[in-house]
Amino acid sequence: MTKIGPAYRILTSRLVLRCWEPRDAPLQAAAILESREHLLPWMPWAAQEPVELSQRANWLRKCRGNFDLDQDYIYGVFNLDETRVLGGTGLHTRVGEAAREIGYWIHKDYTHQGLATELTAALTRVAFEIDGVERVEIHCDPGNVYSAAIPRKLGYFYEGTLRARSLNSDGSPSDSMIWTMLHQEYLASPCAAARLEAYDARGERIL
């Protein structure tokens, strides 16, 4: 498929997903600090929190640079007026050519509201219709039953569980469930019906 992206800004019914900017550092810091204990069992990077605001701004600057260079696509998850960070997500390029991996975390105050499902469906559609990939993957810890429920609900195929392929926050090895969706499976999945608007770097609507 032809690539017309990347999508810098995506609007769903309840969320704004957009490329991080250095100015987002205070909002991101607050969301992570408030959710740190909630994130620690599943997100090894949470063990390094909190970090200095200048360090965080530099990291967000790097995220923007990777986005502009088509190296990786990391999004902030915001409420509709962008006054609060509700989480983070991404269309990661680390799973190979013509493929994306979707990762996600949600602020502790906004879990169990279907937000991760909403953003995952939207990003799956963006991956296939804008980025033109052939495969999308989701990886999660087998113990994270809420996270694993999302790809199952959206029609992803469970490939299997890889043993000791990632690390817990304490450095110990952890298993990883692998879920995939292929391009030929996408149109029959709930993701194809995801309602969204997507915009490029110039603010032009592309979906």
Image: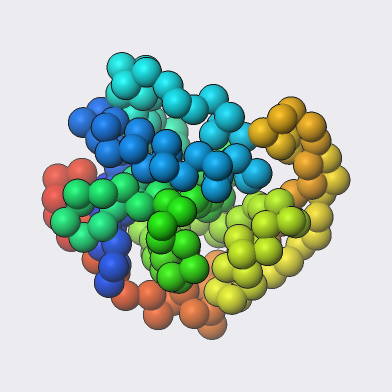
Residue at 35 percent of width and 33 percent of height: 29
Q: Is residue 93 left or right of residue 164?
A: left
Residue projecting furthest to the right: 163
Residue 53 image-quadrant placement: top left
* Position in image of residue 45 (x %, y %): 56, 32
**Can the viewer see residue 107 in this picture?**
yes
Please tell me whether residue 27 is drawn above or below residue 5 in the rendered image: above
Please tell me whether residue 182 is drawn above or below residue 153 in the rendered image: above
Q: Is residue 137 left or right of residue 12?
A: right
* Position in image of residue 21 (x %, y %): 25, 34
**Can the viewer see residue 6 in this picture?**
no
* Position in image of residue 33 (x %, y %): 42, 36
Locate the C terminus by quadrant: bottom left
Figure label count: 0
Nearer to me, 170 or 151: 170
Snapshot colouring = rainbow
Please tell me whether residue 23 is drawn above or below residue 202 in the rendered image: above
Locate the N terminus by quadrant: bottom left
* Position in image of residue 188 (x %, y %): 54, 82
Please tell me whether residue 52 is drawn above or below residue 84 in the rendered image: above
Nearer to me, 118 or 48: 48
Q: Is residue 149 left or right of residue 68?
A: right
Residue at 49 percent of width and 27 percent of height: 49
Residue at 22 percent of width and 55 percent of height: 199
